[in-house]
Image (tube, rainbow, N blue to C red):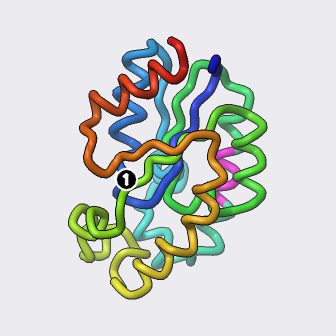
Amino acid sequence: MKAEKIYLVGFMGAGKTTVAKALAKRLDWRAVDVDELIEARERASVAEIFARRGETYFRAVEREVLADQLGQPHLVVATGGGTFADPQNRAAIQRDGVSIWLDVPLERLIDRVPADGRRPLAADRMGFERLYHQRRAAYEQAHLRLDAGRAGVDALVEQLVDWLGA
């Protein structure tokens, strides 16, 4: 499948940012991370934004930052864990490029994501698990599902390059 733009979606800790950077390098494209763009714009970490302004404010900024990426070709976008769960964002992503779900089992994500407050929605483990199950229905709507639970970054990039025919 030919694509001009790739959006990596999936739960926090799935490796979206790492894979985005490696894939963009392999394709000679640019990589951007939605959470990093939000932090730069707001001059605060995601955790600080959640603490000071709340999740509703964060999601509004996320929607604006995502809109800024629309129409830009040859870009690999690492979305935030909740970006694709929002129906408006999901529709924009699906129209603008190819969405690829990095699917990682819950147990592996629990090992990868510390409950130390750096990721506000990971601090409460019961809530973390509930959120994981809620968001899966959205992730399942991605154009492609990639089993990212066991494969390393290089193997995932090769699978994507093969799939894209690049």
Q: Position of residue 99 (x, y in %)?
A: 61, 40
Image quadrant holding the N terminus, namely top right
Region in magenta: 61-66
Q: Position of residue 45 (x, y in %)?
A: 40, 61
Badge 1 local density, few (<14 within 10 Å), some, or many (20+)? many
- Under tag 1, what secondary structure? loop
Q: Quadrant of residue 124?
A: bottom left
Viewer-nearest residue: 121 or 44: 121
| Residue at horizontal 45 percent and vertical 20 percent from the top | 161
**Horizontally, is 130 left or right of 152 in the view?**
right
> Which secondary structure dominates the residues rendered in magenta?
helix
| Residue at horizontal 67 percent and vertical 25 percent from the top | 72
Q: Is residue 164 above or below residue 100?
A: above
Viewer-nearest residue: 59 or 13: 13
Q: Is residue 120 above or below residue 87?
A: below
Q: Quadrant of residue 68?
A: top right
| Residue at horizontal 52 percent and vertical 45 percent from the top | 145
Viewer-nearest residue: 101 or 81: 101
Q: Quadrant of residue 160?
A: top left
Residue 62 shown in magenta: yes
Which residue is disc 1 drawn over?
14
| Residue at horizontal 44 percent and vertical 85 percent from the top | 127
Viewer-nearest residue: 3 or 30: 3
Q: Is residue 5 above or below residue 60?
A: above
**Horizontally, is 112 left or right of 12 in the view?**
left
**Horizontally, is 110 left or right of 147 in the view?**
left
Q: Is residue 89 above or below residue 31?
A: below
